[in-house]
Amino acid sequence: MTGEPSGGRADGVGGAHTLASAADGPSGARMARSGKIKVHVASKSNVSLYVVLSAFVLVTAFSLVTMDYGKVSFPAAMAAAVEDFVTMMTQPGLGGHFTLPDVIEGLFVSLALALLTTFIGAVIAFVLGLLASCNLSNKGVSNVIKVFMSVARAVPIILWVLVFSVAIGLGPEAAVVGLLFHSVAYLVKAYSESFEEVDAGVLEALRASGASWWQVVFQGVVPEKVNEILSWTFIRFEINFVNAVAVGAVAGAGGIGYQLFLAGSFYYNIHEVGLIVYLCLAVAVVLEVVATKLRKRYIVQR
């Protein structure tokens, strides 16, 4: 007698749970009235995103339709661009404006610029990264450095180079300072976030044993985070090489970027442009391979 009501309640609860599960579907997904599972549920954020994307598409389409092309034939221009691109990629060579030693020298100038800015930037960023870490520095100092570095990162490298070219003058100096400024801002963020991930117990143990601030850094932080420090530095070196090529013409810094600018904008020699592009791509691939091997051989297996 006493078991029957209990069993009835259990069946009722179980039945309700079964109905709720059937209504929700697998993993709590909502069911439509037709019995099908609603994979996507509309939300205000999704609607806003669709509205913004639709507006961009409409504005772009309107601009393409109403743009005054003058006497330019769009199909003919596209065909010529494709033809020039194919020629550039399939027929690279020297056209008499540069010799091969000149191009190689420009390549090494760009590499030297990237190496210089990366090395100096890494040293400065290491100190600032320590001061920007909440677990190693005062909170006020940390916040000030992080805000300043965020502003520095938000400004494109080209703009920094132009700003310093006004103060210093066009030349390699403006390119070095501009690249260095942005490299420091980039690496400070990377280093500080890595330092903040160090186990707090390790730092507290070192402090309790009477270790100084620098001893805490070099005995507790650096040994644990050297992998990430070197990895971020390698990545920044690759980025700086690309940026050195880009700012070569903007700031008159020379290097292979300036030669690329001359070949494309002054001499209009597609073959020379193709050769320089292939050299830049080859160096970028070599840097990536070398960085990967160094990380695997000397860092990961340490």
Image (tube, grey):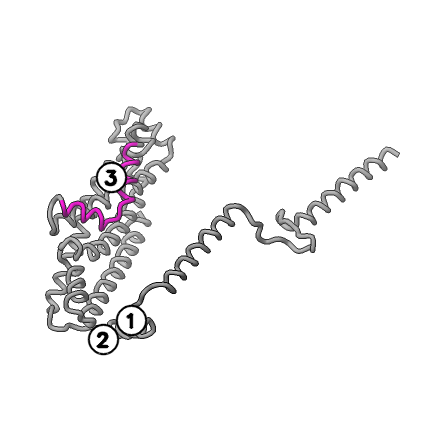
Q: Is residue 210 magenta?
A: no
Dot in front, 1 or 3: 1
Label 3 packing within 10 angstroms: few (<14), some (14-19), many (20+): some
Q: Residue furthest right?
A: 1
Q: Earlier in the sequence, mark 3 or mark 2?
A: 2
- Whether pointer 1 and pointer 3 mark residues with C-beta atoms closer than 8 Å, the reply is no
Stretch in magenta: 144-166
Return the residue at label 2: 91
Q: Earlier in the sequence, mark 2 or mark 1?
A: 1
Return the residue at label 3: 126
Dot in front, 3 or 2: 2
Quadrant of the image occupied by residue 60: bottom left
- The vertical placement of 74 against 256, above or below, is below
Q: Is residue 151 magenta?
A: yes
- Whether pointer 3 and pointer 2 mark residues with C-beta atoms closer than 8 Å, the reply is no
Q: Residue at x 59, y 54 (%)?
A: 39
What amino acid is found at the position of numbered circle 2 in the picture?
Gln
- Measured from the top left, where is residue 126 in percent x and y? 24, 39
- The vertical placement of 285 against 171, above or below, is below
